[in-house]
Amino acid sequence: GCGGILTAPPGGTVTSPNFPDDYNNDETCEWTIIVPEGSMVLLTFDSFHLEADFDFLTIYDGGSDSAAELQSLTGEGSIDPISSTANQMFLRFTSDSSLAAQGFQFSYT
């Protein structure tokens, strides 16, 4: 499986399944990142390449997808760092039934 609950400190690195090889079709991964109260989560992307307009990494400003959506990322390119307003962030990666790509790698602190 993929996804899970992540904490910082110590922080760490997250990749899409199989990275740097292509991820699978029909994949769903969910991560919750929790840092101490009074801190915020910071994502820094090292690599990003998804099938444009069909595969997405959606980032929410809280502990679930009921929180405000910060960004929905697709395609490829450089991604500016993304930060939460509070101490939790929720991420969901989804791929559709055709065409995969290398995926992504990011660090969280």
Image (tube, grey):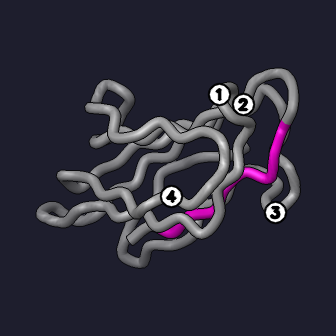
Q: Which mark is residue 53?
A: 1
Residue lying furthest top: 97
Relative height, residue 34 to residue 94 (above, below): below
- Considering the numbered disc 4 on the image, is that residue within a helix, a strand or a loop? loop
Image location (x, y in percent) of residue 63: 32, 40
Type of residue at label 1?
A: Asp
Whole-Å distance between the Cαs marked 3 and 1?
21 Å
- Considering the numbered disc 3 on the image, is that residue within a helix, a strand or a loop? loop
Find residue 13 and report its image quarter. bottom right
Q: Nearer the viewer, residue 73 or 92?
A: 73
Q: Tell me the mark number nearer the camera, choosing from 3 and 4.
A: 4
Which residue is tagged 2?
A: 95
Whole-Å distance between the Cαs marked 3 and 4?
17 Å
Whole-Å distance between the Cαs marked 2 and 4?
19 Å
In-image side of 91 versus 67 (left or right):
right
Does the magenta portion include 51? Answer: no
